[in-house]
Amino acid sequence: MPFHSNCFSFSLGPSAAPLPQRSHRRSAAMAAGVPDPQSRFGHSVKGLLTEKVNACGTDVIALTKQVLKGSRSSELLGQAARNMVLQEDAILHSEDSLRKMAIITTHLQYHVELSSNLQDQLKHLLK
């Protein structure tokens, strides 16, 4: 949006606006080394605008870094969740295997006891 004043036209973007027009009297003041107030104001506005643009650029960079960091954090959390599910499956499988081994151990103990009883009966019969 252009900024208009009595003396000159200032635009923030490309346009067909004419170049700044200054009066002969002000040009003489500038030649004498005396800065004209509107020129100082223009430099001040340009300086402030440059500062704002730099600050916005810095903010955009910081925001981009935060977004990327958040994205990476989400990826890591997702990977951790998948690993946890895999570990949970492994733990459940291990628990199932331990139950089966406990049942097999019980059956083996029963067969050992039965064999021992049969052995005792055989010894008693052979006497």
Image: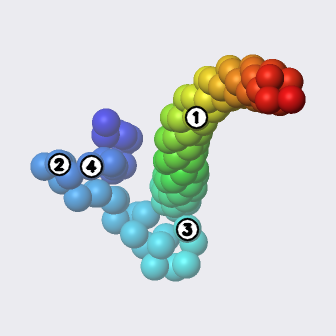
Q: Amino acid at mark 1?
A: Ala
Labelled disc at residue 35: 3
Check disc 1 and report its element: helix, strand or loop. helix
Check disc 2 and report its element: helix, strand or loop. loop
Name which residue lies at 57% across and 72% down: 34
Q: Which residue is mark 2?
A: 15
Residue 111's image quarter? top right
**CA separation, marks 2 and 4?**
6 Å
Is any atom of residue 53 visible in this view? yes
Q: Amino acid at mark 4?
A: Gly
Within 10 Å of disc 2 (Cα), the crowding (few <14, some 14-19, many 20+) is few
Q: Amino acid at mark 2?
A: Ser
**CA separation, marks 1 and 2?**
69 Å
Is any atom of residue 77 visible in this view? no
Q: Which residue is mark 4?
A: 13
Whether residue 90 is situated above or below residue 36 in the rendered picture:
above
The answer to whether mark 2 and mark 4 are in CB contact below 8 A is yes
Residue 58 is situated, as x and y percent measured from the top left of the image, at 56, 54
Name which residue lies at 31% across and 36% down: 1
Within 10 Å of disc 1 (Cα), the crowding (few <14, some 14-19, many 20+) is few
Residue 105 is situated, as x and y percent measured from the top left of the image, at 72, 28
The answer to whether mark 1 and mark 2 are in CB contact below 8 A is no
Q: Amino acid at mark 3?
A: Pro
Residue 21 is situated, as x and y percent measured from the top left of the image, at 28, 57
Sooner in the amino-acid sequence: mark 1 or mark 2:
2
Name which residue lies at 56% across and 39% down: 83
Q: Which residue is mark 1?
A: 90
Check disc 3 and report its element: helix, strand or loop. loop
**CA separation, marks 4 and 3?**
25 Å
Sooner in the amino-acid sequence: mark 1 or mark 3:
3
